[in-house]
Amino acid sequence: DTGVSQNPRHKITKRGQNVTFRCDPISEHNRLYWYRQTLGQGPEFLTYFQNEAQLEKSRLLSDRFSAERPKGSFSTLEIQRTEQGDSAMYLCASSHGGAGNIQYFGAGTRLSVL
Amino acid sequence: EDKVVQSPLSLVVHEGDTVTLNCSYEVTNFRSLLWYKQEKKAPTFLFMLTSSGIEKKSGRLSSILDKKELFSILNITATQTGDSAVYLCAVENNTDKLIFGTGTRLQVFP
C-alpha cells in the first residue's frame, strides 16, 4: 500500500498520560500535515511540514502538543498530559506541494482519553 | 476569519435520486477548493477546483466552482447506497492549509 499510513489506529489512554502517533506519508511527498477531527465536524488544521521544517502551527496546538519530522520522511505527533478534550481523530495528510497541491489523507488515529 | 459553510448538513434520499451539495466560502487568498468523501475513515479525494465555470466530472459525480459568488456545488446523479458518506468541502489558502466545512452527511436508502 503506497498511501498515507498512520499508527496506531486506535489509542485509549488515561488522563494525564503522554501519547505519540506516527504518520508515514506517500514516499515522494515533501509536505506533511496534521489535522484534528471531532465528531460531527470537519478536520481542523494543526501543523504542517515541508521536508523536516515545521512551517506553521495552529493556535489550536497548545504547549502540550509537539510534532516532529526529523528526517523529512515520517512524522510523530506527541500529546503530553492528555486531557479529555484531546479525544478526537488525528488525521495526517501528505502532498507534493506546488500547483495542484492535493492533500491525501491517512485513515487517522482515534484517541480516547478516559 | 476564514470560513467554509456547507449545506445541507444532512440529506436522506432513495437510490436513483439526484442530489446537490452546496459549499460557500469566505477565505482570503483563495487558491483552490477541494471535495472529499469520508466514510468511516480517511477522507478520500474527489475533485480540486481552481477556475470558475469549468465542470469537473468523474462518473456520476460532478462539481463546479463560482469564484465570483464564492461557492461550489457537488452533484451526484443516480445515487447508490455506496454513495452514503460525509462529503467534505475544503478551501486551500496561500498558506497551504485546508479550511474545512462541517460536511454534509448523505444517506442513500434502497
Image (tube, helix red, strand yellow):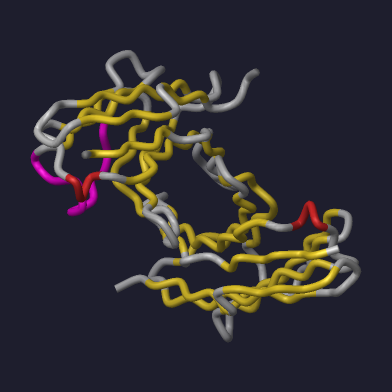
B97 or B20: which is nearer to us?
A: B20
Classify the position of the C terminus of chain B by image quarter.
Answer: bottom right
Residue B64 falls left or right of residue A34 = right
Residue B92 horizontal/vertical position (percent): 47, 57
Q: Main SS of the magenta segment? A: loop
Is the residue B98 above or below the residue B29 in the image? above
Residue A110 falls left or right of residue A112 = right
Residue A73 horizontal/vertical position (percent): 41, 17
Classify the position of the N terminus of chain B by image quarter.
Answer: bottom left
- Residue range in magenta is A54-63
Q: Residue at point 55% right, 24% down?
A: A26
A62 or A31: which is nearer to us?
A: A62
Q: Residue at point 86% right, 68% down?
A: B77
Point out the residue furthest to the top here: A71
Is the residue A80 above or below the residue A70 in the image? below
Residue B71 horizontal/vertical position (percent): 59, 78
Q: Residue at point 83% right, 71% down?
A: B14
